[in-house]
Each structure stands twice: as C-alpha cells, then as structure tokens.
Image (cartoon, rainbow, N blue to C red):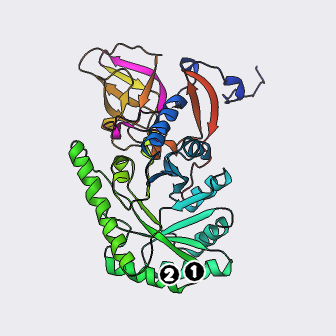
Amino acid sequence: MNNDSSISKYTKTSSDLGTKVEKLPTPSLLLDIEIVRSNYASIAKKYKNTACKMRQHGKNLKTPKLALMQIEAGGTVNGICSAKVSEAEVMVSGGIKDILITNQIVTPDKIKRMCKLSKLADIKVCVDNLENVRLISEIASTLDTTIGILIEIETNMKRAGVRTIEYAINIVKLIDTLPNIQFRGIMSHQALYKYQGEKHRKDTAKNTISKCLEFKKAIESEGFPIEIVSSGETFTYDVSPKMPGVTEVEGGTYALMGTVYSFLKDFEVANKLLTTIINKPDPQTIVCDIGYLSMPRAGDELLQIENLPNVKFQDMYKYHTVFTSSSEIPINIGAKVKLIPNYQDPLIDSWDEFFIIENDILIEILPITGRGTFH
C-alpha cells in the first residue's frame, strides 16, 4: 500500500520564465507586451500635440504597472480613472498619484476611504445629486482633506448622470458654498452600442460629447470656471481631441483590445487566452478546456480563434467552449490555440495573473492586483 498522500500541484514561479507559449499550462491569460507598447505608442502619438489628453481607465487593466506604462509612454494627463474606491486604492498603492473615480460614492464608509486616499494622491470623484455633495463635504471636513468634484452628465447611456443643465448649475452652486470640496469640472461617458461604419461612429462621438460641452458653456456662463472636461472613451479617441473644450478622454479598451472594437485599426488585441483542444467529436467541431468561469459570457459570438477565421463560436459551459466550422478544422486533440476575446473588463477580473509574452516566450508573471476590487 502506498502511504504517500502528497498531492502534486502546478505552481507558477520565476523558473517558468523563458518557457515557450506552446509549453505553458492551459488555460492561461496571455499578454503580448509588444502589442501593449504599440497600442500605448499610438495614444502617445495621437495626443502628443493636443490640448486634450488620455486618462486611461484602470478597470480595463487592474494592474498599476500597466497603467504606469502608458503614463511613461506619453499622451496622458499623468493619471487614470478608477471605477471603484477599492480599485483606486490598489492603483495609488502601485504609484498612481492622480485618479478620477468615475462613479458616485454615496455611502459614509466608502467616502471615508476615499478621503483617506486623498491624503496620498489627487483624488476626484463624480457626483450627480445634491445629497451626495453634502455628505462628501461633511466627511472630508471631519477628516481634514479636500476632494475634487466633477459633475457627471448623462449623454446616451441612461444610467448615472445629471439630466438637466439647471440641476447641474444647482450642484455647482452648492459645491461653491461647502467646505473641503472643490468643483473641478464635468464628466460624461458614452457608448457605441453597435458599429455601423466610420461616419456613424464619429457622429455618435460628436453628438454625445457635444451634449457635455453644452453643460460646460452654461456652467461657465454662471461664472464658474471649468478646469476639466472628461468626456469620451476608446471609440471617440480620435474625435475628442478635435473638439475644443474637451480636456481628457477616458479610454480603456484600446490598451488590451478585443474583437468588439476590431474596427479601430490603430490598435491590436494584446490579451489572448491559451487553451488546449480536449475533444474533437467530429471533423468540424472542437472543444477547448476553457469556459465561462474564466472567460465570462458577453458577446460570445465575437470570440475568435487566432489564425482560424472560419471557425465560429457555438457554445460555452463552465469549463468548455465549443467551436464549429462548415469544413474540417485542421487541428487535433492536444493542440493549443489562442482565443481572441471580445471584451476584456470581465475577463481580466477572472484571473490572478497575466503571463507576459514577448516573441512567444514567457518573460514575466504579472499579478492582477486589482482583481475583485468591486467596492
């Protein structure tokens, strides 16, 4: 009888560095660092001589190191966006000193955390109601700090944001009377719900951002100067800089990309999923060893296999993804392929680390320190 009860478990260590991609375990989240650098260089070039700069969104990266790479490459406001206080905490811990929280922080516990963070970095937050403004001022006063305030404007997403110019002006006037908060500007976020060609993309960008600029004009006419107009996102990256008055763009997807924005030719997909073919029930069907527990479902039909454009997504389960083709698929059981994700926000938050790849060689294992920062 064998009394050895030890269990062998694969662990990722620095000894794996130098491993070729095809030898890595699956599934794995790969990040091609050369493509990241290229995407960042495109932004640095686009915004080099513009008044408008990029404020990269941290929710698409979840790692301070990748955000700092864009700041160092250029074209930015030297800061980023964060969707949550907990995400901002990770980013400040990683060396980011300028953060706009693009959300409403309304509960006392989170406002206190935000105020404590403001002693370490320039922290700004978005508001869209009077009660929130009063509470932030009260807590910031108690903790002897100052919070920058931007008013969020609703332009086409029908979620958060002020709907009328009159109410926005009322918020600005209230901010002006309260201690330990400072009116810094306005913010809006846009969405392109379906790509219908370049004219439609650019028209959507112009129309939605113009709504935000109308608020800017009205607020300034009341005697309140606006320092920041943070408006736009990845699909407006080349439109926002041409609109006078916009000072920054909240782009995120461009950094790592996905098939959802494949129409933007200045950027390539940097994050891919290495997976093994574990079953081939017939010549036209393959099954991969990855499912929705590590690759959340969202626009599944846009999921692609690299170098196999005629192989299409069919279905996904917890640990399996099925692809089919109208003709025989030229790969066998045991082969490894790279999946090109459609969108990276929920994908990145499903993993503990990136396998950083250069020339198809593993050069670094980068922890995703912002994973699970929902609060």
Instruction: Please tell me which of labels 2 and 1 falls first in the chain.
Output: 1
| Residue farthest along the bottom direction in this orientation | 177
Which residue is denoted by mark 1 in the rendering?
137
Q: Is residue 110 visible?
A: yes
Residue 270 lies within the magenta run:
yes
Question: What amino acid does circle 1 point to?
Answer: Ser
- In the picture, the quarter occupied by the C terminus is bottom right
Which residue: 32% across, 31% down? Answer: 313
The answer to which of 16 and 278 lies nearer the viewer is 16
Which residue is denoted by mark 2 in the rendering?
175
Residue 229 lies within the magenta run:
no
Q: Is residue 375 visible?
A: no
What is the secondary structure assignment of the residue under circle 2?
helix
Magenta range: 255-284
In the rendered image, residue 101, in percent from the top left (x then y), is placed at: 52, 62
What is the secondary structure assignment of the residue under circle 1?
helix
